[in-house]
Image (cartoon, helix red, strand yellow):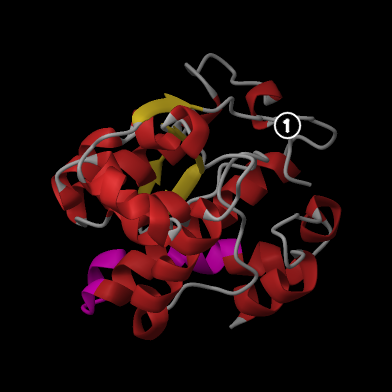
Amino acid sequence: SAFDRLLHDHVSRDGRVDYARFRASKPFADYLRQLSATDPAAITDRSARLAFWINAYNAFTIDLIDRNPGVRSIRDVPTAGAKGPWDIPFIHIGGATYTLNAVENEVIRKQFTEPRIHFALVCAARSCPQLRNEVYSGAKLTRQLDEQARIFLANRTINRVESATNTLLLSPIFDWYKDDFIKAAGSVERFVAPYLPAESRPKLMRNELGVQFTTYDWSLNG
């Protein structure tokens, strides 16, 4: 509930994040400590456990930016010898230490077969899915993830069908994690079809559109 209030107060409806207010917030610092003290294995409901990890990823991403005030992109965060900002071991949960990559790839993607997490995990960039201004919860998770998919695929600067050229333009997220979408639906085109305009769906289902990937904007979503 604490993180829910913070997201409501410090994240705009279009997903822009007020990092300065998060950085100055004692309740946010308290929430991070609460995450660290939690044993995820004790969360027996699968949906609630996935919601916990999504919230943790997003909260610690905010924390990483707040530890480096003034950065214009998450890629500008000093890595202190790590391969990249996603490989900094700064996340402490349940007695274990994680990187952002470990949370996403070793925990969430390995333990949960749910490709829609790629529309909920927010890496602090403008081309990421927008940060939701409420927490994810087990009871609402299916609806929340579906809404995130619809919001992300409705962003025509990132994802759209160009009928004149029979081209499907998609975020690079669908390239980076294509195996997850193929596993879920048989192809990336079949996965995105229900979220795109109805007139485009027959060609998408028949894989008749050429696929290209749009440019990723890594500037901060602040």
Q: Is residue 91 above or below residue 149?
A: above
Horizontal and vertical percent for residue 205?
23, 48
Query: Along the horizontal axis of the image, is 124 left or right of 213?
Result: right
| Label 1 element class | loop
Where's the N terminus, which quadrant?
bottom right
Horizontal and vertical percent for residue 28?
69, 65
Place residue 31 in its image quadrant: bottom right
Label 1, residues with CA under 10 Å away: few <14, some 14-19, many ≥20: some
Work out whether residue 94 or residue 156 is closer to the camera in this orientation and state it: 156
Q: Please give the name of the residue rendered at 18% of the width and 51% of the height, measured from the top-left corner.
A: 185
Place residue 102 in its image quadrant: top left
Q: Please give the name of the residue rendered at 19% of the width and 55% of the height, measured from the top-left corner.
A: 113
Query: Along the horizontal axis of the image, is 103 left or right of 23?
Result: left
Q: Please give the name of the residue rendered at 58% of the width and 57% of the height, measured from the top-left corner.
A: 59
| Start-end of magenta stretch | 32-46
Q: Most extreme residue toward the front, as rendered?
A: 164
Horizontal and vertical percent for residue 45?
23, 79
Task: Identify the amino acid type marked 1.
Answer: Ser
Q: Can residue 97 be seen in the rendering of this structure?
A: yes
